Amino acid sequence: ERHSLSKVSWVFPGASIQSYLEEQNNVPLNIGITGESGSGKSTFVNVIRGLNSKDDGAAPTGCVETTMEVKSYPHPNYPNVIFWDLPGVGTTNFPADKYLKHVGFERFDFFIIISADRFRENDVKLALEIKRMQKKFYFVRSKIDHNLRDERDDQGSEFNEKQTLDRIRTNCIQGECLRLEDTNVFLVSNRKLHLFDFPLLQQTLERELPAHKRDALLFAMPNINLEIIQKKKEAFQAQIKYFASVSALIASAPVPGVSVAADAAMMATTVAQYQVTFGLDDESLQTLALTAHVSFDDLKAVMTSPLAAQKITKELIIKVISFSVSEVALMAAEEGARFIPIFGIPAAMSMSFICTYRALSMFLDMLADDAQRVFRRALGLDTSMENCVEKGIQNIFILCGLDYRDRHIITLTNKSSSFNN
Ligand SMILES: Nc1nc2c(ncn2[C@@H]2O[C@H](COP(=O)(O)OP(=O)(O)O)[C@@H](O)[C@H]2O)c(=O)[nH]1
Ligand SMILES: [Mg+2]
Protein backbone atom coordinates (compact mmCIF):
# COMPACT_ATOMS: atom_id res chain seq x y z
CA GLU A 1 0.00 0.00 0.00
CA ARG A 2 2.64 2.46 1.12
CA HIS A 3 4.45 1.93 -2.15
CA SER A 4 1.88 3.41 -4.42
CA LEU A 5 3.33 6.79 -3.54
CA SER A 6 6.72 5.84 -4.85
CA LYS A 7 5.29 4.26 -8.00
CA VAL A 8 4.72 7.70 -9.44
CA SER A 9 8.30 8.76 -8.93
CA TRP A 10 9.37 7.87 -12.46
CA VAL A 11 7.62 11.03 -13.58
CA PHE A 12 10.01 13.12 -11.54
CA PRO A 13 12.92 10.98 -10.46
CA GLY A 14 14.43 13.79 -8.40
CA ALA A 15 11.32 14.79 -6.52
CA SER A 16 12.57 15.21 -2.99
CA ILE A 17 9.15 16.05 -1.62
CA GLN A 18 8.24 12.40 -1.95
CA SER A 19 11.20 11.21 0.03
CA TYR A 20 10.48 13.90 2.60
CA LEU A 21 6.94 12.55 2.99
CA GLU A 22 8.10 8.97 3.23
CA GLU A 23 10.67 9.90 5.87
CA GLN A 24 8.02 11.78 7.82
CA ASN A 25 5.91 8.66 8.01
CA ASN A 26 8.82 6.43 8.97
CA VAL A 27 10.46 8.24 11.88
CA PRO A 28 11.55 5.44 14.24
CA LEU A 29 10.17 5.49 17.76
CA ASN A 30 11.14 2.78 20.25
CA ILE A 31 9.38 2.55 23.57
CA GLY A 32 10.60 0.17 26.27
CA ILE A 33 7.95 -1.24 28.62
CA THR A 34 9.35 -2.79 31.78
CA GLY A 35 8.15 -3.87 35.23
CA GLU A 36 7.72 -7.01 37.29
CA SER A 37 5.89 -10.06 36.01
CA GLY A 38 2.12 -9.68 36.24
CA SER A 39 2.19 -5.87 36.40
CA GLY A 40 0.38 -5.52 33.08
CA LYS A 41 3.23 -4.81 30.62
CA SER A 42 2.02 -7.10 27.85
CA THR A 43 -1.56 -5.89 28.24
CA PHE A 44 -0.34 -2.29 27.99
CA VAL A 45 1.68 -3.12 24.86
CA ASN A 46 -1.53 -4.45 23.31
CA VAL A 47 -4.05 -1.81 24.29
CA ILE A 48 -1.79 1.08 23.36
CA ARG A 49 -1.60 -0.45 19.87
CA GLY A 50 -5.38 -0.78 19.77
CA LEU A 51 -5.30 -4.57 20.00
CA ASN A 52 -7.19 -7.09 22.09
CA SER A 53 -5.17 -9.85 23.68
CA LYS A 54 -6.60 -12.37 21.19
CA ASP A 55 -5.77 -10.37 18.06
CA ASP A 56 -3.02 -11.33 15.65
CA GLY A 57 0.25 -9.76 16.69
CA ALA A 58 -0.88 -9.29 20.30
CA ALA A 59 1.63 -9.95 23.08
CA PRO A 60 0.68 -13.01 25.16
CA THR A 61 -0.78 -11.90 28.49
CA GLY A 62 -1.51 -13.47 31.84
CA CYS A 63 1.49 -15.77 31.77
CA VAL A 64 4.23 -15.78 34.36
CA GLU A 65 7.46 -14.49 32.86
CA THR A 66 10.29 -16.98 32.85
CA THR A 67 12.44 -15.88 29.95
CA MET A 68 14.84 -12.99 29.67
CA GLU A 69 13.66 -12.40 26.14
CA VAL A 70 13.26 -8.90 24.77
CA LYS A 71 10.29 -8.85 22.39
CA SER A 72 9.35 -6.19 19.90
CA TYR A 73 5.78 -5.34 18.95
CA PRO A 74 5.47 -2.93 16.04
CA HIS A 75 2.33 -0.83 15.77
CA PRO A 76 0.00 -2.49 13.22
CA ASN A 77 -0.44 0.68 11.14
CA TYR A 78 2.86 2.40 11.89
CA PRO A 79 5.55 -0.29 12.05
CA ASN A 80 8.15 2.42 12.63
CA VAL A 81 6.68 2.79 16.12
CA ILE A 82 7.77 -0.20 18.18
CA PHE A 83 6.73 -1.14 21.69
CA TRP A 84 9.20 -3.45 23.42
CA ASP A 85 7.89 -5.91 25.99
CA LEU A 86 10.87 -6.24 28.30
CA PRO A 87 11.44 -8.85 31.02
CA GLY A 88 11.21 -7.50 34.58
CA VAL A 89 14.56 -6.69 36.19
CA GLY A 90 13.61 -9.27 38.83
CA THR A 91 13.20 -11.99 36.19
CA THR A 92 16.68 -11.38 34.82
CA ASN A 93 18.41 -11.14 38.20
CA PHE A 94 20.70 -8.54 36.66
CA PRO A 95 21.64 -5.34 38.45
CA ALA A 96 20.17 -2.25 36.73
CA ASP A 97 23.23 -1.43 34.59
CA LYS A 98 23.64 -5.00 33.27
CA TYR A 99 19.90 -5.15 32.68
CA LEU A 100 19.97 -2.05 30.50
CA LYS A 101 22.85 -3.49 28.48
CA HIS A 102 20.94 -6.75 28.10
CA VAL A 103 17.81 -5.07 26.69
CA GLY A 104 19.87 -2.76 24.45
CA PHE A 105 18.98 0.58 26.06
CA GLU A 106 20.52 2.70 23.27
CA ARG A 107 17.64 2.04 20.92
CA PHE A 108 14.92 3.32 23.26
CA ASP A 109 13.47 6.79 23.05
CA PHE A 110 12.10 6.37 26.57
CA PHE A 111 11.06 3.75 29.12
CA ILE A 112 7.76 3.10 30.84
CA ILE A 113 8.10 1.34 34.19
CA ILE A 114 4.86 -0.38 35.19
CA SER A 115 3.80 -1.62 38.59
CA ALA A 116 0.46 -2.97 39.80
CA ASP A 117 1.22 -1.86 43.35
CA ARG A 118 3.98 0.10 45.11
CA PHE A 119 7.16 0.78 43.16
CA ARG A 120 10.03 -1.28 44.59
CA GLU A 121 13.72 -0.88 45.10
CA ASN A 122 14.35 -2.59 41.77
CA ASP A 123 12.19 -0.09 39.93
CA VAL A 124 13.91 2.84 41.58
CA LYS A 125 17.40 1.53 40.85
CA LEU A 126 16.42 0.99 37.26
CA ALA A 127 14.95 4.50 36.98
CA LEU A 128 18.15 6.00 38.41
CA GLU A 129 20.25 4.04 35.93
CA ILE A 130 18.03 5.09 33.02
CA LYS A 131 18.47 8.68 34.12
CA ARG A 132 22.23 8.22 34.34
CA MET A 133 22.17 6.97 30.74
CA GLN A 134 20.40 10.23 29.88
CA LYS A 135 17.18 8.60 28.85
CA LYS A 136 13.69 9.33 30.12
CA PHE A 137 11.40 7.10 32.15
CA TYR A 138 7.79 7.32 33.22
CA PHE A 139 6.17 5.45 36.11
CA VAL A 140 2.81 3.88 35.34
CA ARG A 141 0.69 2.43 38.12
CA SER A 142 -1.65 -0.08 36.43
CA LYS A 143 -4.90 -1.88 37.35
CA ILE A 144 -6.49 1.24 38.83
CA ASP A 145 -9.92 -0.15 37.90
CA HIS A 146 -9.30 -3.04 40.32
CA ASN A 147 -8.36 -0.74 43.18
CA LEU A 148 -11.37 1.46 42.68
CA ARG A 149 -13.68 -1.52 42.55
CA ASP A 150 -12.24 -2.94 45.76
CA GLU A 151 -12.44 0.42 47.54
CA ARG A 152 -16.02 0.90 46.41
CA ASP A 153 -16.91 -2.55 47.77
CA ASP A 154 -15.15 -1.85 51.07
CA GLN A 155 -16.35 1.66 51.72
CA GLY A 156 -19.85 1.67 50.28
CA SER A 157 -21.42 5.11 50.57
CA GLU A 158 -18.23 6.61 52.03
CA PHE A 159 -16.39 5.91 48.79
CA ASN A 160 -14.76 8.90 47.16
CA GLU A 161 -13.00 8.28 43.88
CA LYS A 162 -10.73 11.30 43.96
CA GLN A 163 -9.52 10.60 47.49
CA THR A 164 -8.85 6.99 46.59
CA LEU A 165 -6.83 8.00 43.52
CA ASP A 166 -4.83 10.54 45.54
CA ARG A 167 -4.03 7.93 48.16
CA ILE A 168 -2.86 5.39 45.54
CA ARG A 169 -0.71 8.09 43.98
CA THR A 170 1.11 8.89 47.23
CA ASN A 171 1.31 5.31 48.41
CA CYS A 172 2.89 3.90 45.29
CA ILE A 173 5.83 6.31 45.37
CA GLN A 174 6.82 6.08 49.02
CA GLY A 175 10.00 4.78 50.55
CA GLU A 176 12.69 4.14 47.96
CA CYS A 177 10.97 6.33 45.40
CA LEU A 178 11.72 9.42 47.43
CA ARG A 179 15.27 9.14 46.12
CA LEU A 180 13.90 10.27 42.76
CA GLU A 181 13.05 13.94 42.89
CA ASP A 182 9.81 15.11 41.33
CA THR A 183 8.78 11.79 39.91
CA ASN A 184 5.39 11.73 38.31
CA VAL A 185 3.34 8.60 38.39
CA PHE A 186 0.50 8.02 35.96
CA LEU A 187 -2.48 6.02 37.20
CA VAL A 188 -3.79 3.84 34.39
CA SER A 189 -6.32 1.12 33.73
CA ASN A 190 -5.45 -1.01 30.75
CA ARG A 191 -9.14 -1.90 30.60
CA LYS A 192 -10.15 1.75 30.23
CA LEU A 193 -7.34 3.71 28.68
CA HIS A 194 -9.42 6.85 28.20
CA LEU A 195 -9.88 7.26 31.96
CA PHE A 196 -7.51 8.38 34.76
CA ASP A 197 -4.01 9.52 33.78
CA PHE A 198 -3.42 7.87 30.41
CA PRO A 199 -4.44 11.01 28.48
CA LEU A 200 -2.03 12.99 30.66
CA LEU A 201 0.72 10.45 30.01
CA GLN A 202 0.13 10.77 26.28
CA GLN A 203 0.35 14.58 26.49
CA THR A 204 3.50 14.40 28.61
CA LEU A 205 5.22 12.01 26.21
CA GLU A 206 4.29 14.21 23.30
CA ARG A 207 5.60 17.33 25.02
CA GLU A 208 8.87 15.73 26.06
CA LEU A 209 9.70 14.01 22.78
CA PRO A 210 11.91 15.80 20.25
CA ALA A 211 9.72 17.64 17.73
CA HIS A 212 10.46 15.35 14.78
CA LYS A 213 9.15 12.31 16.71
CA ARG A 214 5.87 13.83 17.89
CA ASP A 215 3.75 12.95 14.88
CA ALA A 216 5.01 9.37 14.95
CA LEU A 217 3.73 9.02 18.51
CA LEU A 218 0.51 10.88 17.82
CA PHE A 219 -0.48 8.79 14.80
CA ALA A 220 0.21 5.56 16.71
CA MET A 221 -1.89 6.55 19.73
CA PRO A 222 -5.35 5.07 20.22
CA ASN A 223 -8.28 7.50 19.84
CA ILE A 224 -8.88 7.92 23.56
CA ASN A 225 -10.46 11.36 23.35
CA LEU A 226 -11.71 14.01 20.96
CA GLU A 227 -8.52 16.05 21.42
CA ILE A 228 -6.39 13.25 19.99
CA ILE A 229 -8.66 12.95 16.98
CA GLN A 230 -8.40 16.71 16.47
CA LYS A 231 -4.61 16.67 16.82
CA LYS A 232 -4.27 13.84 14.31
CA LYS A 233 -6.42 15.80 11.92
CA GLU A 234 -4.25 18.89 12.31
CA ALA A 235 -1.04 16.90 11.77
CA PHE A 236 -2.47 15.34 8.60
CA GLN A 237 -3.73 18.72 7.42
CA ALA A 238 -0.21 20.10 7.75
CA GLN A 239 1.07 17.36 5.41
CA ILE A 240 -1.49 17.96 2.67
CA LYS A 241 0.46 20.79 1.05
CA TYR A 242 3.30 18.37 0.34
CA PHE A 243 0.98 15.84 -1.30
CA ALA A 244 -0.52 18.65 -3.33
CA SER A 245 2.96 19.68 -4.46
CA VAL A 246 3.70 16.13 -5.57
CA SER A 247 0.56 16.16 -7.64
CA ALA A 248 1.53 19.54 -9.14
CA LEU A 249 4.83 17.99 -10.22
CA ILE A 250 3.01 15.07 -11.77
CA ALA A 251 0.68 17.47 -13.56
CA SER A 252 3.63 19.10 -15.29
CA ALA A 253 4.21 15.80 -17.14
CA PRO A 254 3.09 16.47 -20.67
CA VAL A 255 1.03 13.27 -20.84
CA PRO A 256 -2.72 13.85 -20.44
CA GLY A 257 -4.49 11.43 -18.13
CA VAL A 258 -1.39 10.51 -16.13
CA SER A 259 -2.09 13.28 -13.67
CA VAL A 260 -5.57 12.18 -12.62
CA ALA A 261 -4.68 8.49 -12.38
CA ALA A 262 -1.50 9.08 -10.39
CA ASP A 263 -3.27 11.58 -8.13
CA ALA A 264 -6.06 9.13 -7.41
CA ALA A 265 -3.54 6.41 -6.51
CA MET A 266 -1.66 8.75 -4.20
CA MET A 267 -4.87 10.01 -2.64
CA ALA A 268 -6.13 6.48 -2.07
CA THR A 269 -2.96 5.59 -0.16
CA THR A 270 -3.18 8.76 1.90
CA VAL A 271 -6.89 8.49 2.63
CA ALA A 272 -6.46 4.82 3.61
CA GLN A 273 -3.86 6.02 6.11
CA TYR A 274 -6.37 8.55 7.51
CA GLN A 275 -8.92 5.76 7.80
CA VAL A 276 -6.77 3.40 9.88
CA THR A 277 -5.30 6.22 11.96
CA PHE A 278 -8.78 7.36 12.93
CA GLY A 279 -9.66 3.73 13.69
CA LEU A 280 -12.37 3.60 11.03
CA ASP A 281 -11.28 0.48 9.17
CA ASP A 282 -13.33 -2.66 9.79
CA GLU A 283 -10.73 -4.27 12.02
CA SER A 284 -10.36 -1.29 14.33
CA LEU A 285 -14.12 -0.85 14.51
CA GLN A 286 -14.52 -4.48 15.45
CA THR A 287 -11.98 -4.15 18.26
CA LEU A 288 -13.65 -0.98 19.47
CA ALA A 289 -17.07 -2.66 19.39
CA LEU A 290 -15.68 -5.43 21.58
CA THR A 291 -14.00 -3.21 24.16
CA ALA A 292 -16.78 -0.62 24.32
CA HIS A 293 -19.56 -3.25 24.39
CA VAL A 294 -21.33 -1.57 21.51
CA SER A 295 -22.39 -3.45 18.40
CA PHE A 296 -20.33 -3.11 15.26
CA ASP A 297 -23.45 -2.05 13.35
CA ASP A 298 -24.21 0.69 15.86
CA LEU A 299 -20.76 2.10 15.31
CA LYS A 300 -21.16 1.94 11.55
CA ALA A 301 -24.57 3.57 11.75
CA VAL A 302 -23.22 6.88 13.09
CA MET A 303 -20.74 7.38 10.26
CA THR A 304 -22.02 9.74 7.60
CA SER A 305 -19.23 10.11 5.05
CA PRO A 306 -19.39 8.34 1.69
CA LEU A 307 -16.13 6.61 2.73
CA ALA A 308 -17.70 5.03 5.80
CA ALA A 309 -16.98 1.34 6.19
CA GLN A 310 -15.54 1.15 2.69
CA LYS A 311 -12.23 -0.18 1.50
CA ILE A 312 -10.38 2.85 0.16
CA THR A 313 -9.50 2.25 -3.48
CA LYS A 314 -8.52 4.47 -6.37
CA GLU A 315 -11.94 3.83 -7.87
CA LEU A 316 -13.77 4.91 -4.72
CA ILE A 317 -11.70 8.09 -4.52
CA ILE A 318 -12.51 8.93 -8.14
CA LYS A 319 -16.17 8.15 -7.56
CA VAL A 320 -16.46 10.41 -4.51
CA ILE A 321 -14.55 13.19 -6.19
CA SER A 322 -16.65 12.94 -9.30
CA PHE A 323 -19.76 13.51 -7.19
CA SER A 324 -18.26 16.75 -6.11
CA VAL A 325 -19.14 19.22 -8.86
CA SER A 326 -16.50 21.81 -8.02
CA GLU A 327 -13.68 19.25 -7.98
CA VAL A 328 -14.69 17.87 -11.37
CA ALA A 329 -14.74 21.33 -12.87
CA LEU A 330 -11.22 21.92 -11.56
CA MET A 331 -9.95 18.61 -12.89
CA ALA A 332 -11.47 19.14 -16.30
CA ALA A 333 -9.90 22.56 -16.40
CA GLU A 334 -6.57 21.01 -15.52
CA GLU A 335 -6.79 18.54 -18.40
CA GLY A 336 -7.81 21.39 -20.71
CA ALA A 337 -5.06 23.69 -19.53
CA ARG A 338 -2.44 21.13 -20.46
CA PHE A 339 -3.14 21.80 -24.13
CA ILE A 340 -2.65 25.51 -23.96
CA PRO A 341 0.86 25.87 -25.38
CA ILE A 342 3.56 27.52 -23.27
CA PHE A 343 1.33 28.63 -20.40
CA GLY A 344 -0.32 25.26 -20.22
CA ILE A 345 1.99 23.40 -17.94
CA PRO A 346 2.27 25.93 -15.10
CA ALA A 347 -1.51 26.40 -15.23
CA ALA A 348 -2.10 22.65 -15.02
CA MET A 349 0.35 22.49 -12.15
CA SER A 350 -1.38 25.07 -10.02
CA MET A 351 -4.79 23.61 -10.70
CA SER A 352 -3.58 20.19 -9.81
CA PHE A 353 -2.22 21.59 -6.56
CA ILE A 354 -5.52 23.20 -5.65
CA CYS A 355 -7.47 20.15 -6.73
CA THR A 356 -5.46 17.69 -4.66
CA TYR A 357 -5.31 20.08 -1.73
CA ARG A 358 -9.06 20.50 -1.67
CA ALA A 359 -9.85 16.86 -2.26
CA LEU A 360 -7.54 15.61 0.50
CA SER A 361 -8.83 18.25 2.89
CA MET A 362 -12.38 17.18 2.10
CA PHE A 363 -11.58 13.51 2.76
CA LEU A 364 -9.74 14.38 5.95
CA ASP A 365 -12.66 16.46 7.25
CA MET A 366 -15.12 13.68 6.52
CA LEU A 367 -13.08 11.00 8.24
CA ALA A 368 -12.15 13.10 11.28
CA ASP A 369 -15.81 13.87 11.64
CA ASP A 370 -16.78 10.21 11.45
CA ALA A 371 -14.07 9.40 13.98
CA GLN A 372 -15.59 11.83 16.46
CA ARG A 373 -19.05 10.37 15.95
CA VAL A 374 -17.80 6.83 16.39
CA PHE A 375 -15.92 7.87 19.52
CA ARG A 376 -18.99 9.51 21.01
CA ARG A 377 -21.12 6.51 20.16
CA ALA A 378 -18.61 4.11 21.72
CA LEU A 379 -18.74 6.08 24.95
CA GLY A 380 -22.50 6.39 24.80
CA LEU A 381 -22.32 10.18 24.31
CA ASP A 382 -24.67 12.39 22.37
CA THR A 383 -24.74 11.06 18.80
CA SER A 384 -28.45 11.30 18.26
CA MET A 385 -30.10 10.24 15.05
CA GLU A 386 -31.15 13.83 14.30
CA ASN A 387 -27.54 14.83 14.42
CA CYS A 388 -26.66 12.16 11.84
CA VAL A 389 -29.41 13.20 9.48
CA GLU A 390 -28.24 16.82 9.53
CA LYS A 391 -24.65 15.70 8.93
CA GLY A 392 -25.80 13.45 6.10
CA ILE A 393 -27.43 16.47 4.47
CA GLN A 394 -24.25 18.48 4.94
CA ASN A 395 -22.24 15.81 3.17
CA ILE A 396 -24.63 15.82 0.23
CA PHE A 397 -24.08 19.58 0.05
CA ILE A 398 -20.34 19.12 -0.03
CA LEU A 399 -20.57 16.46 -2.70
CA CYS A 400 -22.71 18.72 -4.85
CA GLY A 401 -20.13 21.46 -4.48
CA LEU A 402 -22.54 23.63 -2.49
CA ASP A 403 -21.69 25.47 0.66
CA TYR A 404 -23.39 23.64 3.49
CA ARG A 405 -22.98 26.65 5.71
CA ASP A 406 -25.86 27.98 3.64
CA ARG A 407 -27.96 26.97 6.57
CA HIS A 408 -31.27 28.35 5.34
CA ILE A 409 -31.65 25.42 2.94
CA ILE A 410 -31.23 22.98 5.81
CA THR A 411 -33.61 25.08 7.87
CA LEU A 412 -36.06 24.86 5.01
CA THR A 413 -35.95 21.07 5.02
CA ASN A 414 -36.43 21.11 8.77
CA LYS A 415 -39.44 23.38 8.40
CA SER A 416 -41.05 21.25 5.76
CA SER A 417 -40.66 18.16 7.91
CA SER A 418 -42.30 19.85 10.89
CA PHE A 419 -45.02 21.05 8.56
CA ASN A 420 -45.74 17.42 7.70
CA ASN A 421 -46.16 16.60 11.35
N1 LIG B 1 -8.23 -5.12 35.78
C1 LIG B 1 -7.06 -4.98 35.17
N2 LIG B 1 -6.35 -6.07 34.84
C2 LIG B 1 -5.17 -5.90 34.20
C3 LIG B 1 -4.66 -4.61 33.90
N3 LIG B 1 -3.48 -4.77 33.27
C4 LIG B 1 -3.25 -6.10 33.19
N4 LIG B 1 -4.25 -6.79 33.75
C5 LIG B 1 -4.35 -8.24 33.92
O1 LIG B 1 -3.23 -8.63 34.72
C6 LIG B 1 -2.72 -9.90 34.27
C7 LIG B 1 -1.22 -9.78 33.93
O2 LIG B 1 -1.06 -8.91 32.86
P1 LIG B 1 0.15 -9.05 31.83
O3 LIG B 1 -0.06 -7.97 30.81
O4 LIG B 1 0.28 -10.44 31.31
O5 LIG B 1 1.39 -8.70 32.77
P2 LIG B 1 2.94 -8.81 32.44
O6 LIG B 1 3.41 -10.08 33.08
O7 LIG B 1 3.54 -7.61 33.10
O8 LIG B 1 3.14 -8.82 30.97
C8 LIG B 1 -3.55 -10.28 33.06
O9 LIG B 1 -4.52 -11.20 33.46
C9 LIG B 1 -4.19 -8.99 32.63
O10 LIG B 1 -5.45 -9.19 32.02
C10 LIG B 1 -5.45 -3.47 34.27
O11 LIG B 1 -5.09 -2.30 34.07
N5 LIG B 1 -6.63 -3.72 34.90
MG1 LIG C 1 4.09 -10.27 29.80
Image (cartoon, rainbow, N blue to C red):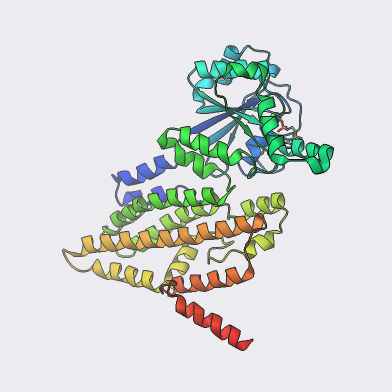
Residue 19 quadrant: top left
Q: Residue furthest left?
A: 342
Residue 37 quadrant: top right
Taking 179 as reference, is 22 left or right?
A: left
Q: Closer to the camera, 268 or 286?
A: 286
Q: Position of residue 163 (x, y in %)?
A: 70, 36
Q: Residue at x 58, y 45 (%)?
A: 222
Taking 291 as reference, is 353 left or right?
A: left
Q: Residue at x 73, y 39 (%)?
A: 145
> How many numbered discs sit on the rendered protein?
0
Taking 115 as reference, is 97 left or right?
A: left
Q: Closer to the camera, 157 or 305?
A: 157
Q: Residue furthest bottom?
A: 420
Q: Position of residue 299 (x, y in %)?
A: 65, 60
Q: Residue at x 41, y 36 (%)?
A: 211
Q: Position of residue 129 (x, y in %)?
A: 55, 15
Q: Position of residue 358 (x, y in %)?
A: 38, 62
Q: Residue at x 46, y 63 (%)?
A: 317
Q: Closer to the camera, 240 or 230?
A: 230
On the question of residue 152 being in view, the answer is yes
Q: Quadrant of ligand 1?
A: top right
Whether 282 is drawn above or below 46: the answer is below
On the question of residue 26 being in view, the answer is no
Whether 358 is drawn above or below 332: the answer is above
* Quarter of the image where the C terminus is located: bottom right
